[in-house]
Amino acid sequence: MSQTINDVSYPVILLVGKTGAGKSTLGNMLLKQPHDDGHFQVSADMESVTQECSTAIISIDGITYNIIDTPGIFDTQLVTDKILEEIAKTIKKCKYGIKAILFVFEAKRFSAEQRGVLEGIRNFFGEGATNYIIAIFSHATKAQIYDRDIMRKAWNQPVCSFIEDIENRWGISPNSDYFPPDDPTHQARLGEIKAFISSMRGVYTTEQLEESLQEQEEAFRQKEEEEERKKHEHEEKLKEIARKEAEEAHKRKVEQIERERKAKQEYEENLKRKQQQEAEEKHRQMVEKMKQEERERKIQEENLRKKQQQEEEERYRRKLEQMRQEKEREEELRRQREREWEL
């Protein structure tokens, strides 16, 4: 039997986790419905189908609960204020509290990421919510589903630490392709999850959520106040720095004026000597320039003479070479005619 969120009339079993982790699939199996065609819509890809919370009625050990499927609240790319607001609004309607929070994640993704997701749950629901979390491993291998010890041996340190934090409350979501709903292994894995739910003491209340949200708001307010205080202190420091810099600039200006006065006096005293030195240096440079130009002129004339001589020698050499080649050609012609006569 399905209900709207406005009709939450029993303690709640909350399904949370990342998109594609298998929350909706587990919910359908707990409802004894086809895992991929039940009350909760299942997506074939990683795009979240569940953007709003949906609920259904379930009975465990004779006690009636509302089981609620949530959006991918901890998706890095999908978390929005709208989704968080939707989940908070839903929980506030759970007047009989939350019996269990089933945190579903893929068995193959054993990494420190799960601890980050756990921190996300704590931050959103508050530290008290940890007492109601049951970890559910999904997408497990056939061997892991069949034997819990095989699953346990696959854990690394982050997973072990995570399970310890929630007092060893964990289960395995069965795969209907490996073990059909009437298979004892399928029923055993779901039975273990239901047993954990039934054994939970008390419920997570809307008051606890309100307290958590208020704490988050207070922490946010304090953070803003601290940032504003630091901003004000920074501005005051900047003003003090500006004042000191202005005083230092004025002091430097006075000192600069005094230095300029002394420098001007020294300049005037040295100006005549400098002008005289410049005149002498200019005369010396002119004389040196004339000498240099004369040397360069002679060098150019000598280079020109050598160049002309080389060119004349080269022309004479080419002429001799040409005469030699012509003589060789004539000699060759003569020999050729002699050979022709002999023939």
Image (cartoon, rainbow, N blue to C red):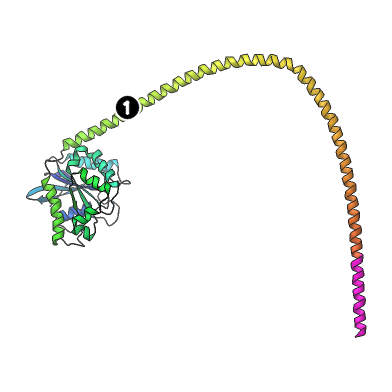
Residue drawn at (76%, 20%), measured in percent from left and top?
274
Which residue position is annotated with label 1?
A: 225
Q: Please, which residue is most extreme toward the bottom here? A: 343
**Horizontal and vertical percent position of residue 98:** 15, 42
Q: How many numbered dots are placed on residues in this image?
A: 1
Instruction: Classify mark 1: helix, strand or loop.
Output: helix
- In this orientation, which residue lies closer to the viewer: 187 or 62? 187
- In this orientation, which residue lies closer to the viewer: 281 or 168? 168
The 10 Å Cα crowd at callout 1, few under 14, some 14 to 19, many 20 or more, is few
**Horizontal and vertical percent position of residue 177:** 21, 62
Residue drawn at (46%, 21%), measured in percent from left and top?
241
Residue 147, located in which quarter of the rendered image? bottom left
Residue drawn at (84%, 29%), measured in percent from left and top?
286
Check the image and report above or below for 274 versus 188.
above
Left/right placement of residue 66 relative to residue 110 reads left
Residue 269, located in which quarter of the rendered image? top right
Check the image and report above or below for 46 versus 92.
below
Please state, as top left, top right, bottom left or bottom right, where the C terminus lies in the image.
bottom right
**Horizontal and vertical percent position of residue 19:** 27, 50
* Whether residue 318 is visible: yes
* Whether residue 65 is visible: no
Residue drawn at (88%, 49%), measured in percent from left and top?
307
Instruction: Tell me if residue 329 is in the magenta stretch.
Output: yes
Instruction: Tell me if residue 301 is in the magenta stretch.
Output: no
**What secondary structure predominates along the stretch shown in magenta?**
helix
Q: Which portion, as a residue range, is magenta? A: 323-343
Q: What amino acid is at disc 1?
A: Glu
Check the image and report above or below for 245 versus 342.
above
**Horizontal and vertical percent position of residue 157:** 27, 47
